[in-house]
Image: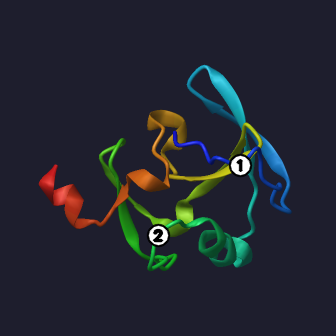
Amino acid sequence: MIRPTEAGEPRLAFPTRPLKVGRRTVEEYIIPDEKKQAVLAELYPFEPVPALDEQMFDLHEGKLFTVRDFRVTREDDHNYLVSPYYPASGGSVIDWMPPEAAEEE
């Protein structure tokens, strides 16, 4: 996973729960549906920001997902935007591809 260069970043204003990822446990933010678009806009590093109802392809998992199903984890004093399949295959936002990529696999 890519690590931001700054020493840390502020926590998001949401509660968290433990999320098992491989052999380690990280924190996963519990984000209400009505806040998901704002969180996505804040954390998505590319332009344009996808709509919540768009489909994306998780390169690591090899599966499509609906953007609204994203997860946000708190690890090493940073917030990470990750795929819904993150616990199984570790795909972060940089591994999200357009749905056409699924046809190429």
Q: Is 59 placed above or below 38 here?
A: above
Q: Is residue 18 left or right of residue 24?
A: right
Residue on which the image places disc 2: 46
Quadrant position of residue 24: top right
Amino acid on which disc 2 is placed: Phe
Residue 18, x across and y down, in percent? 76, 37
Residue 73, x across and y down, in percent? 68, 47
Seen as rendered, the residue at the extreme top is 23
Residue 86, x across and y down, in percent? 52, 42
Quadrant position of residue 20: top right
* Residue in the picture at 44% in, 80% down: 48
Instruction: Give 19 or 10, whichever is nearer the viewer.
Output: 10
Few, some or many C-alpha atoms within 10 Å of disc 2 (few <14, some 14-19, many ≥20)?
few
* Residue in the picture at 55% in, 67% down: 44
* Residue in the picture at 38% in, 69% down: 55
The residue tagged with tag 2: helix, strand or loop?
Answer: loop
Q: Is residue 23 left or right of residue 84?
A: right
The residue tagged with tag 1: helix, strand or loop?
Answer: loop
Residue 96, x across and y down, in percent? 39, 57
Q: Is 71 placed above or below 34 here?
A: above
